[in-house]
Image (spheres, grey):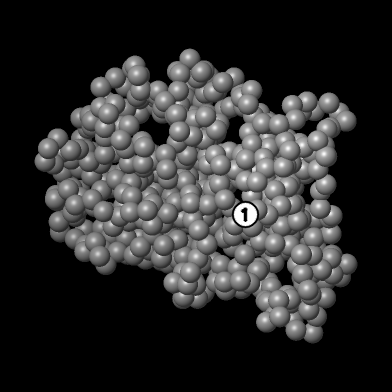
Amino acid sequence: MGNVWARIRAYLEPCLPCLSQGADKPVVIANPGARCSPVTPPRSQRQEPERSSSHYFVALYDYQARTAEDLSFRAGDKLQVLDTSHKGWWFARHLEKREDGYNQQLQGYIPSNYVAEDRSLQAEPWFFGAIKRADAENQLSYSENQTGAFLIRESESQKGDFSLSVLYQGVVKHYRIRRLDEGGFFLTRRKTFSTLNEFVSYYTTRSDGLCVKLEKPCLKIQVPMTFDLSYKTADQWEIDRNSIQLLKRLGSGQFGEVWEGLWNNTTPVAVKTLKPGSMNPNDFLREAQMMKGLRHPKLIQLYAVCTLEDPIYIITELMRHGSLQEYLQNDAGSKIHLTQQVDMAAQVASGMAYLESQNYIHRDLAARNVLVGEHNIYKVADFGLARVFKQVDNEDIYESKHEIKLPVKWTAPEAILAKQFSIKSDVWSFGILLYEIITYGKMPYSGMTGAQVLQLLGQNYRLPQPSNCPQQFYNIMLECWKAEPEERPTFEILQWKLEDYFETDYS
């Protein structure tokens, strides 16, 4: 379990605001060691009183304008933020005009999570914030990074400390950066630093106890998703279906089809087109209102809807590799092995732990409802939709009271028999998802009907351990299938167990 208990202790301490609450007012860590000087705005620029501190920002990623009101920029551009009142989208202007003619527009709306306040730690190319150890390893392992690539992140287990993660000959090593009582930093007390900038400068000239001298910062390939399609759709997210082009069908199911689409001729999106009569539009809109407010890096972001005529469109972020079920089946073990499988499970558990913290129940967690993006990113999709779908006939669907039909092979017994849905019934489904992951997308309870499965579950039957499944992984599955819901682990504990699965050194 490694540092699980340290994490539990840290979790009980006061923590930073959650992502959804702090989207428009991010926590900024001052960086007194920054070597850059303050940006002096031209005299002609108006000064806005929206922020009491400096409101000059640095772009962390490229952004291409999606609407006429947006502002395009490139990583490293300096921007002055003029208005932060709109959640997720700020009004800003360029402080410099590009000589190459790129981005002639000088002001417009920008996604707030694409920039960091100038002279803050977030603005440093080597600072990656509060990412997990596993995510640090994934990002450093990109083929574009070479030995010596590094990043600094906030420590998971020791609040206020930082962690240094370094790539060395294909393996990622982790070091704790401790704080001095007077505010400095050190790896060992024989050498201390006033700032993290001094720390980085020193170890880029010599290794001095590290596995290797620090070279280039880890590439920031994982570009964050914007919270909405644009600043206008944040509140008015019933959009004109004529603004959506359907380009390529990605898949189909009992409720409709999924397409790769394009919004406003600028923005790739995924579009779920629902069969007429598959849901009540009013019920869906009530659920979608809650779904849109759920924001987490491991949840598919709902962007907009088209409900005024059939077919209903659900517009979300695009995950180009489709469902996890198909992704696993297509690979069948050629490239995906235990390390990747555990990482998949940990990412799903992270998204579900967030839903757990929001008292939100998925109701249909399965590999078919997890989507795969670039750079080994996995996100939970279709959370909450099972509540509003009108189910169709299928031998693997069990119909209980009031016309509620359930996918028996993924559903907890208490949810089937007594409609007792809870986050603990989602945990049961997560155990089935683990079975799908370790078997490369095989059908659980293969050859059995839903009625047969229900009968066997009543006799305390559980899926047997697959031949390629380590005992440690199977034990986690069995914990999810405890007969009493309250005996099943929380998703937070499941996330920690999976993230610590291969732990051998410091996190």
Q: Is residue 60 above or below residue 27?
A: above
**Which quarter of the picture shows residue 397?**
top left
Q: Position of residue 324 (x, y in %)?
A: 46, 42
Task: List the single residue furthest toward the top.
Answer: 242
Q: Depth check: give the residue in front, 18 or 203.
A: 18
Residue at image location 81% in from the left, 48% down from the top: 39
Residue at image location 64% in from the left, 49% down from the top: 51
Q: Position of residue 63 (x, y in %)?
A: 68, 35
Q: Depth check: give the residue in front, 428 or 87.
A: 87
**Which quarter of the picture shows residue 130?**
bottom right
**Which quarter of the picture shows residue 406?**
top left
Task: List the single residue furthest toward the bottom.
Answer: 190
Horizontal relation, residue 209 to residue 347: left or right? right
Q: Badge 1: few (under 14), some or many (20 or more) residues near its Cα, within 10 Å? A: some
What kind of element bears circle 1?
helix
Q: Is residue 478 above or below residue 177?
A: above
Q: Is residue 276 above or below residue 366?
A: above
Q: Depth check: give the residue in front, 48 or 397.
A: 48
Amino acid type, label 1 = Asn
Asked if one can make out residue 470 in the rendered structure from this viewpoint, the answer is no
Q: Position of residue 103 (x, y in %)?
A: 76, 28
Query: Quick one: quadrant of the C terminus?
Result: bottom right
Horizontal relation, residue 88 to residue 108: left or right? left
Q: Position of residue 98 (x, y in %)?
A: 84, 32
User: Dot 1 corresponds to which residue?
Assistant: 138
Residue at image location 32% in from the left, 37% down from the top: 287
Residue at image location 49% in from the left, 34% down from the top: 234
